[in-house]
Amino acid sequence: MRVSGLDGALARIAAGGLAGVVVATATQVRLPLIAGCAAEGLPVYVEKPLAFEVAELAAIEAVAAPVAARSMLGLMMRYHPAFRELAGADLGGTYRFSFDIGHDVTLWRANWRFADSYAARAAGGGVLLDLCHELDMAACLFPAATLDAVESIGHRRYPGVDMATRISLGGNALGSVSMDYLSPVSTRRIDIAGTDVRRVVDLLAWPLERNQMFLAVMRDWLALIEGQPASGVEHPPRLDLVGRSCRMVVDAYAARHFVGELTGEKP
């Protein structure tokens, strides 16, 4: 049965006969869908980020509470084997860490233009939200991390959209998360400096098909729906367990300080 629009989706949810619902809409229209699913007792799989505004996040957390333990947020990097190794390691001696990701956004997909995408919108677009996996991984591995500052580079053609962002984290270690849409050479790297060991991880060098992580998180969600045990991943992105990470994302988004602006034709 094909449905279109928010009203059609809500009507289909209310009609019954569903085991769960995947919510992969634009971020600002997720609240009514999640609320409709929760009212019917339907678990959801929601694409990240869960929200980009503090009030919206609080509202989603409230309405989703009845199904949150059986629902998932699409933070699939938690299933990356390199991240899982770090999640199982003793990081107690860490004094400095960094997470870096950079891609040329114009090369992401065939027959796709950044200017026409949701990512190019001032409300809910930009690299911080689009590539928030790195901030999520930092929040998982370093639960004492606090948000200190967020500096962004914008673009004259896309007011309010961050093209490159650096997040400074404090707490008991010096941390940073950097992401950009601009790098001509793709990079995805974790660097952890500790008193006893140095860990440098090139995530792009791992022999891993990206879809394996999507399939892994989806298998865990289906297991939750059926009341079965999940895979035992160290940081399951269950909706009732991702609150701190989601709050760090919305707080960082609100704290962006634009320190520069690009003027070229790209992206």
Image (spheres, helix red, strand yellow):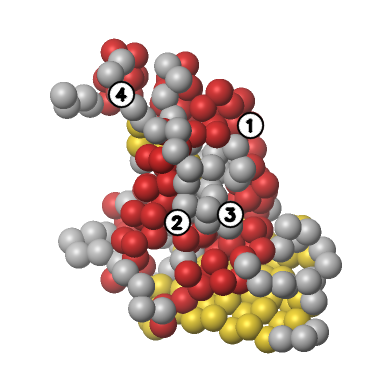
Give the residue pinned by disc 1. Answer: 58
User: Which residue is label 2 attached to?
Assistant: 76
- For the point 71% across and 86% down, which residue is it? 197
The secondary element bearing badge 1 is classed as helix
Q: CA distance from mark 3 to mark 2?
A: 10 Å
Callout 3 amino acid = His
Quarter that holds the N terminus: top left
In the structure shown, which secondary structural element does the residue marked by tag 4 occupy?
loop
Cα distance, mark 2 to mark 4?
Answer: 24 Å
Q: Which residue is mark 3?
A: 235
Place of residue 182 in the rendered image (x, y in percent of width and height, measured from the top left) = 43, 74
Q: CA distance from mark 1 to mark 3?
A: 21 Å
Marks 1/2 in contact by CB < 8 Å: the verdict is: no
140 vs 244: above or below: below
The amino acid beneath tag 1 is Ala
The image shows residue 130, relative to residue 207, as above or below, that is above
* Image quarter (top left, top right, bottom left or bottom right) of the C terminus: bottom left
- Residue 241 left/right relative to 143: left
Q: Return the residue at label 4.
A: 18
Percent position of residue 46, x then y:
43, 40
Inter-mark Cα distance, 1 to 2: 22 Å
Total numbered labels: 4
| Mark before the other along the chain sequence, 3 or 2 | 2
Q: Is residue 175 visible?
A: yes
Instruction: Indicate the quadrant where residue 214 lies.
Output: bottom left
As shown in the figure, which amino acid type bears the numbered disc 4? Leu
Answer few, some or many: residues within 10 Å of disc 3's Cα (few below 14, many 20 plus, some between 14 and 19).
some
